Image (cartoon, rainbow, N blue to C red):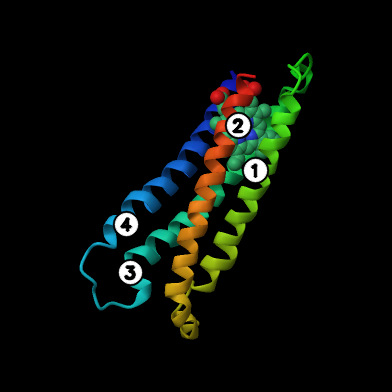
Amino acid sequence: MENNVLIFIHLMAAAVAVGSLAYCLLFFLPVMEKLPEQKIPEEHSVAYKALEVLAPSVLGAVLMLIGTGIYYLLTNYTRQVDLAPGYYNLFGVKMVFVIITLFLSVYHTFTLRARIADLDLSPENRKLVPATLKKMKSLGQMILATLTLTSFLGIWLARF
Ligand code: HEM
């Protein structure tokens, strides 16, 4: 029962992270960019508002994945015997992608997002907004790619 709950949370976190990145970067923002341009401050643009919420949400889901993954292994350590040869090779490759995803997501939230946050307190950063939003979109696509690959490796691992 406990395992089912843990894997359920693990899978839900993966679905939220991949789903929100895919929806925002592949469908929502490209459609919004087609709307006629409006003369409003950068911090009121749809891209700013969407990416401001997206970056920490994805980081939260990645932390949840790491937490549930480690907890699953800790509570099942006595069952980690007689595994098919190659199980830990696959696990190692998955962990490399997990670490890459975590670093990218931390940079996304704590460097790029922080650079253009609270513009009323630091208005000099306003000129950084267009370039930073562009970087956040490309980094988000990279996170989407590494997360998709990690999810594939996770599914492979569970059926190895
Ligand atoms: C970006 C991070 C991660 C993603 C996207 C991810 C994704 C997945 C997915 C989709 C599964 C398949 C579950 C199933 O089909 O039943 C899975 C399984 C698994 N994950 Fe993760 N995972 C991540 C991080 C981690 C971490 C950090 C650990 C451990 C330290 C971990 C340990 C496991 C284990 C042990 C399984 C196999 C469970 C079984 O044998 O049934 N995962 N993961």
Q: Residues within 10 Å of mark 4 (few under 14, many from 20)?
A: few
Alpha-carbon distance for marks 1 and 4? 27 Å
Alpha-carbon distance for marks 1 and 2? 9 Å
Q: Quadrant of the N terminus?
A: top right
Of pointers 4 and 2, the one earlier in the residue sequence: 4
Q: SS of the residue at dot 3?
A: loop
Alpha-carbon distance for marks 3 and 1? 32 Å
Q: SS of the residue at dot 4?
A: helix
Alpha-carbon distance for marks 2 and 3? 37 Å
Residue 97's disc is 1
Q: Which residue is drawn at 71% across and 28% down?
A: 73
**Tag 4 residue:** 30
Q: Residue at x 44, y 81 (%)?
A: 126
Indicate the position of residue 115 as horizontal and vertical percent values: 54, 73
Type of amino acid under label 1: Phe
Answer whether residue 53 is visible to the viewer in this image. yes
**Tag 3 residue:** 45
Residue 153's disc is 2
The picture quadrant for ligand 1 comes to top right
Report the mark closest to the observer, 4 or 3.
Answer: 4
Q: Is residue 71 left or right of residue 123?
A: right
Indicate the position of residue 102 as horizontal and vertical percent values: 63, 50
- Disc 2 C-beta below 8 A from ligand 1: yes
Q: Which residue is drawn at 49% across and 55% down?
A: 140
- Disc 3 C-beta below 8 A from ligand 1: no
Name above or below for residue 145 compared with residue 45.
above
- Disc 1 C-beta below 8 A from ligand 1: yes
Alpha-carbon distance for marks 4 and 3? 13 Å
Report the mark closest to the observer, 2 or 3.
Answer: 2
Of pointers 4 and 3, the one earlier in the residue sequence: 4
